[in-house]
Image (cartoon, helix red, strand yellow):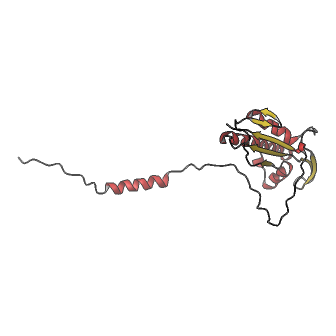
């Protein structure tokens, strides 16, 4: 009896199938996109524009410093990142019109059809070149969260809505005029070594 040989499997199309599977997975897979901090950069200054120094009163500036050891110094005192949001909210609001917190100026808000006392405060953020990216982002998040919470409270106070996001575009503009987000970031410096 003759010996039967096992038939060979045609492997010529295996490369084609593997290639098609590779393309399928590349097309259907979603890639994680890193998100950054949403900031609008100032416009490029005109070449012919004169440099002018703007005089801002010390009480209108909320100074936040981060050193190379990731320590937070707020208004010349050490602070935990967890406490930054409340301190920022107190500065921005200045509900009791304290002399140590920012001045307020009357501003007519068209959308509300009345004059509101608007704080003139600016948050000045500066970090060391050795500051870790993680703590920098944490501080940024706390500062922005303070503005978001205040705007949510204002949305409820002026329009009866629970969230700033629930407002119409005109209503949002009114709240932004009352509480404009003013965060000034200085260029990092070499203050201390790690």
Q: In this view, does 17 lie above or below 126?
A: below
Task: Estimate the x, y position of residue 50 in percent, counting from the top left.
Answer: 85, 62
Task: Estimate the x, y position of residue 190 in percent, counting from the top left.
Answer: 72, 43
Residue ID at (14%, 49%)? 5
Instruction: Give residue 45's quadrant in the image.
Output: bottom right
Pick the quarter of the image with the C terminus.
top right
Q: Can residue 161 be seen in this view?
A: no
Q: Residue furthest bottom?
A: 48
Q: In this view, does 52 lie above or below 184?
A: below
Task: Estimate the x, y position of residue 124 in percent, counting from the top left.
Answer: 80, 45
Residue ID at (81%, 39%)? 88
Q: Can residue 166 be seen in this view?
A: yes
Total marks shown come to 0
Q: Residue furthest left?
A: 1
Residue ID at (79%, 40%)? 64
Q: Nearer the viewer, residue 45 or 37?
A: 45
Residue ID at (25%, 55%)? 10
Is residue 190 found left or right of 13 in the rendered image? right
Q: Which of 9 and 31 is in front in this view?
A: 31
Task: Estimate the x, y position of residue 30 in percent, counting from the top left.
Answer: 53, 51
Is residue 79 found left or right of 26 in the rendered image? right
Q: Which of 172 and 139 is in front in this view?
A: 139
Q: Nearer the viewer, residue 39 or 11?
A: 39
């Amino acid at each position: 009896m003759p010996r039967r040989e096992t038939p060979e499997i045609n492997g010529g199309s295996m490369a084609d199938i593997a290639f098609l599977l590779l393309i399928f997975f590349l097309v259907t897979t979603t890639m994680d996109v890193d998100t950054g901090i949403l900031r609008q950069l100032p416009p490029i200054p005109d070449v012919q524009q004169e440099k002018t120094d703007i005089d801002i009163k010390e009480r209108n500036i909320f100074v936040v410093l981060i050193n190379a050891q990731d320590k937070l110094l707020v208004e010349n005192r050490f602070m935990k990142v967890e406490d930054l949001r409340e301190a920022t909210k107190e500065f921005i609001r200045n509900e009791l019109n304290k002399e140590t917190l920012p001045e307020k100026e009357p501003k007519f808000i068209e959308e509300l059809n009345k004059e509101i006392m608007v704080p003139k405060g600016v948050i000045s953020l500066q970090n060391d070149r050795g500051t870790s990216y993680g703590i920098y982002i944490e501080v940024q998040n706390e500062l922005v969260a303070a503005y978001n919470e205040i705007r949510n409270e204002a949305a409820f106070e002026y329009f009866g809505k629970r969230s700033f996001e629930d407002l119409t575009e005109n209503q949002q503009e009114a709240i932004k005029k009352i509480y404009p987000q003013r965060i000034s970031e200085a260029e990092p410096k070499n203050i201390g070594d790690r």
